[in-house]
Amino acid sequence: KQEVTQIPAALSVPEGENLVLNCSFTDSAIYNLQWFRQDPGKGLTSLLLIQSSQREQTSGRLNASLDKSSGRSTLYIAASQPGDSATYLCAVRRGTDSWGKLQFGAGTQVVVTP
Amino acid sequence: DAGITQSPRYKITETGRQVTLMCHQTWSHSYMFWYRQDLGHGLRLIYYSAAADITDKGEVPDGYVVSRSKTENFPLTLESATRSQTSVYFCASSESAEYYGYTFGSGTRLTVV
């Protein structure tokens, strides 16, 4: 069974620091990995999608890496801002599942202080 | 407007009542999913669908029923609501099983009293 773990569960940084969020998964047979952002009381917003054949994806200040063989992905957020405060979730799309169901981590709650 | 919409955004219902949560997507995505999100449990899959009239159970299907007569709609029905079904419900869609990500709706916050 695929298990997805996100460490740390919570993180607080001063504005301007780079954020590093970790995601690990137990089964390397994945189609892709997706990072989401969730603001309190809101839905999930997709940030980055990395296919299993890719090593990284970038969008603005966000960069996500994927090392499938070691079962790890890292989301980097450069020069953090208070508006980056949210919960960040990673999810893997299981490659052994013909339906491609997502398996979510529990999330990392990020607070960026001014 | 293109996208995935859920209705209602908020719902309060009484124990034992039947309630239906609606999900509509405009992309004609084949795959649709229902999740519930609870503190301490994260996101858990309730039901999913690969196409019209093809559905299957997820991790926590008890007490829920789905139907998918049209590609764009995937309603979730609580047959007899219980307090344990108080939660935030998210619908999601995806174009394929492999190469595409999920897009989520804004959620429905359901309270069963």
Image (cartoon, coloured by chain):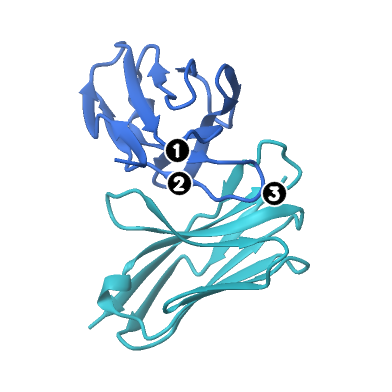
Quarter of image, res A10: bottom left
Q: Are marks 2 and 1 in contact (CB under 8 Å)?
A: yes
Residue at (49%, 25%) from the top-left corner? B71
Residue at (56%, 27%) from the top-left corner? B49
* Mark 2 crowd level (few <14, some 14–19, many ≥20, 10 Å Cα): many
The chain drawn in blue is B
Labels 3, 2: front one: 2
Q: Which residue is mark 1?
A: B27
Q: Is residue B100 above or below residue B57?
A: below
Labels 2, 1: front one: 1
From this viewpoint, is residue B41 visible?
no
User: Chain A, which colour?
Assistant: cyan
Q: Which residue is mark 3?
A: A2
The reply, left or right, for residue B22 in relation to residue B29 is left
Q: CA distance from mark 3 to mark 1?
A: 29 Å
Disc 3 residue type (three-letter): Gln
Describe the element under mark 2 as helix, strand or loop. strand
Q: CA distance from mark 2 to mark 1?
A: 11 Å
Quadrant placement of the N terminus of chain B: top left
Q: Chain of mark 3?
A: A
The reply, left or right, for residue A81 in relation to residue B71 is left
Q: Which mark is residue A40?
A: none
Q: Work out whether residue A47 or residue B27 is closer to the camera in this orientation and state it.
A: B27
Residue at (75%, 55%) from the top-left corner? A27
